[in-house]
Image (cartoon, rainbow, N blue to C red):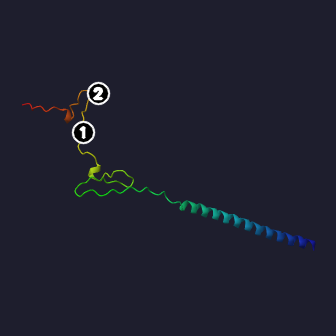
Amino acid sequence: MHGDLVNDSSIIFEKIKYLNMKKITSLVAGLMLLFTGVNYAQNTTTAPAPKAKTDQKAPAAKGTSTTTHMKKDGTPDKRYSENKGSTAKPATTHTKKDGTPDMRYKENKTSTPAKK
C-alpha cells in the first residue's frame, strides 16, 4: 500500500509541476507580446514635427515676373530661367604659370589681320 501512495503522489507532483511550468511559460510569452506591442505603438504614433508656414506675399502686377520660384525646402528652383543666374559667362583670362596670357584661348588672342 505504501508503494501505491508514493507512486500516486509522484504523479500528482509531476502534474502540478507541469501546470506551473505551463503557466510560467504562458506568462512570459504574454509579457513579451505586451512589451512588443507597446514598443511598436510608441514608434508608430510619433507625429512628425510641424512644418513652419511661410508668409504668402501679395501677387505682383501682371506682366512683371519679380517672383522667384522656390522649392518646398526654401531653395530656388533651377527649372526656371530667373533662378538659373546669368547665362553670360564672365570674361576670364587664362594665364600660364609665369603670369603671361595663354594664347591657346580665344579671349587672350588679339584681333590681328590675317597674313597674305
Quarter-wise, where is residue 63 in the image? Answer: bottom left
Q: Residue at x 20, y 32 (%)?
A: 108
Please indicate whether residue 109 sits to the left or right of residue 50 in the image: left
What amino acid does circle 1 point to? Pro
Residue holding disc 2: 97
- The secondary structure type at the circle numbered 2 is loop
Residue holding disc 1: 90
- Above or below, 15 against 67 in this view is below
Q: Which mark is residue 15?
A: none
At which x and y percent is residue 61? 25, 57
> Marks 1/2: CA distance?
21 Å
At which x and y percent is residue 15? 79, 70
At which x and y percent is residue 20? 77, 67
Q: Residue furthest top?
A: 98
Quadrant housing the C terminus? top left
The reply to whether dot 1 and dot 2 touch (C-beta < 8 Å) is no
Q: Residue at x 70, y 66 (%)?
A: 27
- Above or below, 84 against 111 in this view is below
User: Nearest the camera: 2 or 62?
Assistant: 62
